[in-house]
Amino acid sequence: MSRLLYSVTMSADGFVAGPGGDMSWLTPHLGPNPVVDELIGEVGALLVGRRTFGGDDPHRGTEKEGKAFGGGWDGPQFVLTHHAPSAPVPGVTFVGDLARAVAAAKEAAGGKYVNVLGADVARQCLEAGVLDEVLTIVAPVLLGDGVRLFDRPGGTGVRLERLSVGHVPHATNLWYRVAR
């Protein structure tokens, strides 16, 4: 059975994107990471938020621009949106309902992970009780403002169980299971 994993790199002060969705801050913090390298082979599909899909790219201006994991992964992508583009995008399915998007992504993943990309989609998955794991790669930088890893004003906490902790020179890997 496929599991949903929210994998993300964030700043040490909890932001996954800078103001306005700026991802340029991430570029100096991308580098070899055995946890990510192994994960890429275990991902069968992506579940992506519309802002993330159409947003800024830390690989802007390079041959890796617009490619999942900087070109390290290729496969089916499901974008959660109520405003699909008029022209089809190869390899991308636009879905307007979270439950349908999750079901389609799980089926396409074929027992591998469905990797969730986008803070708002991850929040929706948590609230719906369908997110299984969270891999947070903490980069040694403070952004001060932007898109938070998890933002639910007035909300209750979500309990996580630590699966692993590790580090590479440019980041710290924190892998959790969502406690049910």
Image (cartoon, grey):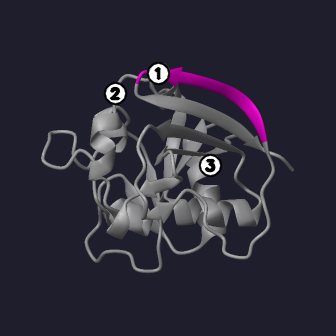
Q: Are marks 1 and 2 in contact (CB under 8 Å)?
A: yes
Residue under numbered circle 3: 106
Kindly report which numbered mark, 3 or 2, lies closer to the viewer in this rendering: 2
Image coordinates of residue 60 in percent, x first then y, are 19, 49
Image coordinates of residue 110 in percent, x first then y, are 60, 38
Q: Are marks 3 and 1 in contact (CB under 8 Å)?
A: no
Residue under numbered circle 2: 31
Kindly report which numbered mark, 3 or 1, lies closer to the viewer in this rendering: 1
Q: Residue at x 78, y 60 (%)?
A: 157
Image coordinates of residue 96 in percent, x first then y, are 52, 75
In the rendered structure, which amino acid carries the disc numbered 2? Answer: Gly
Residue under numbered circle 1: 168
89 drawn magenta = no
Q: Is 31 positioned to the left or the right of 64 in the image?
A: right
Q: Which residues are magenta?
A: 161-169
Image coordinates of residue 105 in percent, x first then y, are 56, 52
Q: Residue at x 87, y 50 (%)?
A: 180
Determine whether the residue tagged by mark 2 lies in a helix, strand or loop: loop
Identify the mark nearer the N-term, 3 or 1: 3
Q: Residue at x 42, y 21 (%)?
A: 169
Kindly report which numbered mark, 1 or 2, lies closer to the viewer in this rendering: 1
Q: To which quarter of the image does residue 37 belong?
A: top left
Q: CA distance from mark 3 to mark 1?
A: 30 Å
Determine whether the residue tagged by mark 3 lies in a helix, strand or loop: helix
Determine whether the residue tagged by mark 1 lies in a helix, strand or loop: strand
Q: Are marks 3 and 2 in contact (CB under 8 Å)?
A: no
Q: Is 45 positioned to the left or the right of 102 in the image?
A: left
Identify the mark nearer the N-term, 3 or 2: 2
Between residues 110 and 7, which one lies in front from this camera angle?
7
Check the image and report above or below for 44 versus 127.
above
Question: The N terminus lies in which quarter of the figure?
Answer: top right
In the rendered structure, which amino acid carries the disc numbered 1? Answer: Val
